[in-house]
Amino acid sequence: MDKKTFYITTPIYYPSGKAHIGHSYTTVAADTIARYKRMQGYDVFFMTGTDEHGQKIERRAKDAGVTPKEFIDPIVEGFQKVWETLDVRYDKFIRTTDDYHVEAVQKIFKQLYDKGDIYKSEYKGMYCAECEAFWTETQLQDGNCPDCGRPCHPASEEAYFFKLSNYADRLLKLYEDNPQFIQPESRKNEMISFINQGLEDLCVSRTSVKWGVPVDFDPKHTVYVWFDALLNYITGLGYTSDNDELFKKFWPADVHFVGKEIVRFHTVIWPAVLMAADIPLPERVYGHGWLLFGAAGEKMSKSKGNVVDPILLADRYGSDAIRYFLMRDIPFGSDGNFTNEALCNRINSDLANDLGNLLSRTAAMAEKYFGGTLPEEKQAGEFDDALIEMAKALPETVDGLICNLQFSTALSEIWKVISRANKYIDETMPWALAKDEANKPRLAAVLYNLAETLRIVGIIITPFLPKSGPKIFEQIGAGEQVRTYDSIGWGNLPANATLKKGETLFPRIDLEKEIAELDAMLAAQQEQAKAAQPKEEEPAAAPISIDDFAKVELKVAKVISCEPVKKAKKLLCLQLDDGSGKPRQVVSGIANYYKPEDLIGHCVVVVTNLHPAKLCGVESNGMILAADNAENDVKVIFVDGMTPGAKIR
């Protein structure tokens, strides 16, 4: 019988800055299930990597005065260092600048062009440089990118297009026939709604971006970064190469792990491209939530400086502690918060008090009462069955949860058994049994049950905590033959096992002192990261003549009234006195920065000769002037004391 295969991927990360704890969340989850499947005997292929092309990296490299490759190489090395520190054991690390990937992308692009699924035309639309994504006017939110919230700009250029619109019905049928394809369920509903709004053909090349895979039959074009990046999942297996054995063996993927913000690319564009190329589809795409920062729950951002360095944490607490926190504290699929308090509390309560203390007490008592080696003669007694039945049932329970990617719940079930074992010590009172020689067989049974419970727990937690499992086995005297998943059944630890107390698995920490020190360390690191982050400058506007400027009519206007626009979090509707004798209604996206009462009575500058526009169903006749004062800070330009209607020139 052929060995079972399992292929899992993370998204390939964009190396515009250092890897942070948010990246680690996805990668540790993928590593956990890859380790678990290997332990069960699967032939596993786990791939991660970096997505290295595109306009953002091109710009940042230019700002740094280096080539794009010189800019990304040290960042990519940093990602690999983080994965090494967190004991991530991937089978392949792909870079989209790798020659084999570039060649494969060119072949697939040409194949779809020859087939008619890619064609040349002109693109006119709204483009987000941050996400490197095109959007229609209807997809924008308050005029901004629906993913990152930043402004989009009109773009027009010759481009190649992929006939995405042809695949709407097939995609909807895919979701209907394969309910597991998009998980969790909420993500699937979002994609159905997105498709039902109408799919437009996808722009898949640029002429204005040079840092990318060249279209080999039309070299002034480079392949759109998302089309290039998505193909990594098959190019990394050797698709189109002289050696495609890995592709034949492992494709289709069992699961792609992606952040919820890129589910659309992986469940709409990616399957449509595969359909066009007549390639089987992946089994499942899982869009997990975000690891947010602090009690306020901000999304981690390198530009905000609120990222957390996993190497700093792993050096301080050990990689297993960080892996445990990431997998235990946040239900996979939901958003969750990283706080120093939450991390330190998990280390103390779950790892030090529960697991570490159980192991330490068990080994210490075996050494104290039996010199470490348990006697053969044992006597069953009260409380044994409750513990043994829980330990016996644990592997099957955890298997179902891990296969459904419920990592947090799986760990919760494991810790129920650990807690039960700690309670078992209190119930059986080994220290009391040890006072009477006649109770030695009963005492031996108690310690054996504790050690055997720890062995089963050790096997199951090793994919989560790869350093801790072997340490548990060493202290309870479990040899190599009883550390495997096949040996997980109850009673396989030798009856005369020799236990030996070793190093403390997870030392307790002084919470108040530790949190204060950690707060200071992370704050200093975040300030450094924020200071080092280059400011992204808007591209300089093309020069205009004085006649061009004269076409813009700027006037002073007084804010008469102001109120929020319903169903729009960012919009305010202002009624202005512009000196014309009748109110002028203007809608402005400044609700995040001003309350209506902050504006009423003030004089502002308004562009009065713009074509009327509707924003969220409300007509706007003009635009008030404001300045980007700093990141996440906008200041309206007030001209109080001037007469409404005064012309600015």
Image: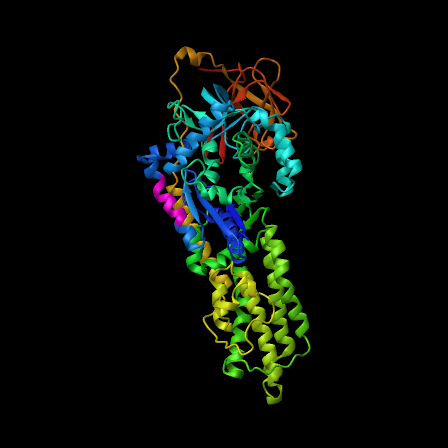
Percent coordinates x, y for residue 71 in the rendering: 34, 38
Where does residue 514 sit, x and y in percent of width and height? 47, 61
Q: Nearer the viewer, residue 155 or 203?
A: 203
Place of residue 294 in the rendered image (x, y in percent of width and height, measured from the top left)? 53, 49
Question: Residue 474: x percent and y percent?
Answer: 47, 70
**Among the 4 quarters of the image, the one containing residue 318:** bottom left
Residue 76 magenta-highlighted: yes
Residue 524 lies within the magenta run: no
Q: Residue extending furthest left?
A: 65
Q: Number of callouts in the render? A: 0
Residue 626 visible, this angle: no
> Magenta-highlighted stretch: main secondary structure?
helix
Quadrant of the snapshot with the C terminus: top left
Left or right, 327 with respect to 221, comes to right
Residue most extreme to the top:
547
Q: Front-most of 82 and 268?
A: 268
Q: Nearer the viewer, residue 430 or 175?
A: 175
Q: How is the image coloured?
A: rainbow
Q: Which residues are magenta?
A: 72-80
Which is more toward the observer, 303 or 285? 285
> As displayed, is residue 301 above or below residue 524?
above
Eyeballing the image, is 497 above or below 18?
below
Q: Is residue 207 left or right of residue 275?
A: left
Say if 293 sits above or below 540 in the image. below
Residue 210 in view, yes or no: yes
Q: Residue furthest front?
A: 1
